[in-house]
Image (cartoon, rainbow, N blue to C red):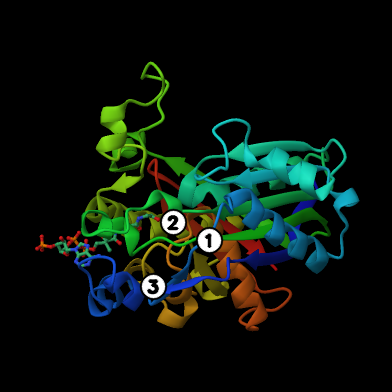
């Protein structure tokens, strides 16, 4: 069976930069607290009515250019987002229309932080069975419109940012490309990182009481997420390396979902690898959920941190809880 590989990758963030000092003026927090607990110094927020599809489309245009492909080459779109423009339909069809992808199929994946890796695994499977030859995988989020920029919402407000990343996945020769992936979930923790409304369990989908208490906005049990993330990241990294027949020493770079710098540091420590082997750019983007891996992978590639033929491991953990890993030879 043929392998698939990422032939193009790119990202796009909205121009407005929001620093920790900007947040200090909106809520009871401090640059020192945010840097110490998360590593984040600034993030990007959209302005006006820009939705996650628009960010994703910009990233997709750049990824197609990076792959040397035109929209007409794309035969399937997978859009990972927890913050779609609409409840129905998904963002994928908005990409399909705006980029003019003929009648290419479009799938939305709602696995939040692990959404990009879940999507990449679907693209890999489609390409490997020979069903599609050029799959566009997008991860994009607008988190800023779902956070409360007040002291009551500060745990979420300081952590999240907006952005998008995209990858083009195509067949490749033996010896490179996606070598293995693993997908996991544990729904016992569904309510530890969630957004309850609008809900099909509620007549009318949302009530005034729900709106007044902010149940249409995401919330989380930060400590619980932190505890599980620091265990699941190393676990899934070992798993995909084992399945690919490789050891940690073979790995050039680990690119994890950017959840919190302390989580990234803990992952390096638990794996027993040098901190610089775990790429982190959360300092400048915050946690961009489904977008964080393609943004980080693009920056790491552009910084020359890996070359053709290097072994790379991607890993993600988040809402669900759901987590995933992927080993690939660039
Ligand atoms: O992609 C997955 C998505 N989620 C995550 O990755 C989140 C993982 N968890 C985390 O990153 C951390 O749990 C947080 C950064 C969210 C919080 O850090 P923490 O060390 O777990 O802090 P905490 O929630 O235990 O809060 C410690 C204190 C509390 O005050 P008291 O009760 O000790 O007086 C909070 O009220 O810090 C307070 N606090 C803040 N202070 C200033 C909480 N948020 C803030 C804030 N600024 N933004």
Q: Quadrant of the N terminus?
A: top right
Q: Quadrant of ligand 1?
A: bottom left
- Within 10 angstroms of label 3, few (less than 14), some, or many (20 or more) residues? many
Beta carbon of the mark 1 residue lies under 8 A of ligand 1: no
* Mark carried by residue 144: 2
Mark 3 to mark 2: distance in Å? 29 Å
Q: Can you name the residue that lies furthest to the front here?
A: 48
Q: Mark 3 and 2 residues: CB-CB less than 8 Å, in contact?
A: no
Q: Which residue is mark 1?
A: 46
Helix, strand or loop under label 3: helix
Image-quadrant location for residue 233: bottom left
On screen, residue 117 versus residue 75, left or right, reads left
Task: Give the x, y percent position of residue 327.
Answer: 59, 60
Query: Which numbered disc flags the more N-terminal residue, 3 or 1?
Result: 1
Task: Give the x, y percent position of residue 47.
Answer: 53, 61
Q: Which residue is mark 3?
A: 268
Q: Mark 3 and 1 residues: CB-CB less than 8 Å, in contact?
A: no
Mark 3 to mark 1: distance in Å? 32 Å
Helix, strand or loop under label 2: helix
Mark 1 to mark 2: distance in Å? 7 Å
On screen, residue 140 versus residue 128, left or right, reads left
Look at the picture and state if 251 lies above or below 193. Answer: below
């Amino acid at each position: 069976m043929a392998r698939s590989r990422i032939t193009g990758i790119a990202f796009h963030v909205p121009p407005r930069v929001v620093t920790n000092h900007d947040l200090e003026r909106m809520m009871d927090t401090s640059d020192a607290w945010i840097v110490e607990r998360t590593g984040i110094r600034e993030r990007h927020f959209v302005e006006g009515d820009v939705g996650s599809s628009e960010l994703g489309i910009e990233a997709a245009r750049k990824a197609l250019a990076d792959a040397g492909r035109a929209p007409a080459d794309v035969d399937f779109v997978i859009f990972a987002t927890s913050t779609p423009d609409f409840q129905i339909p998904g963002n994928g069809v908005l990409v399909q229309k705006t980029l003019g992808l003929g009648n290419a199929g479009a799938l939305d994946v709602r696995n939040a932080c692990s959404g990009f890796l879940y999507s990449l695994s679907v693209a890999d499977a489609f390409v490997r069975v020979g069903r599609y030859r050029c799959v566009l995988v997008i991860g994009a989020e607008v988190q800023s419109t779902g956070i409360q920029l007040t002291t009551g919402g500060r745990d979420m407000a300081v952590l999240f940012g907006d952005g998008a990343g995209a990858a083009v996945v195509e067949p490749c020769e033996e010896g490179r490309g996606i070598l293995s992936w693993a997908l996991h979930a544990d729904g016992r923790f569904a309510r530890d990182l969630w957004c309850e409304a609008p809900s099909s369990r509620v007549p009318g989908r949302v009530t005034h009481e729900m709106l007044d208490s902010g149940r249409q906005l995401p919330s989380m049990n930060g400590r619980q997420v932190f505890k599980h993330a620091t265990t699941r990241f190393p676990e899934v990294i070992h798993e995909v390396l084992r399945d690919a027949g490789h050891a940690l020493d073979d790995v050039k770079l680990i690119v994890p979902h950017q959840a919190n710098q302390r989580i990234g540091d803990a992952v390096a420590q638990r794996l027993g690898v040098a901190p610089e082997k775990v790429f982190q750019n959360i300092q400048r983007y915050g946690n961009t959920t489904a977008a964080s891996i393609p943004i980080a992978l693009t920056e790491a590639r552009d910084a020359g941190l890996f070359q053709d033929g290097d072994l790379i491991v991607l890993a993600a953990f988040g809402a669900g809880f759901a987590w995933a890993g992927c080993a690939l030879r660039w």
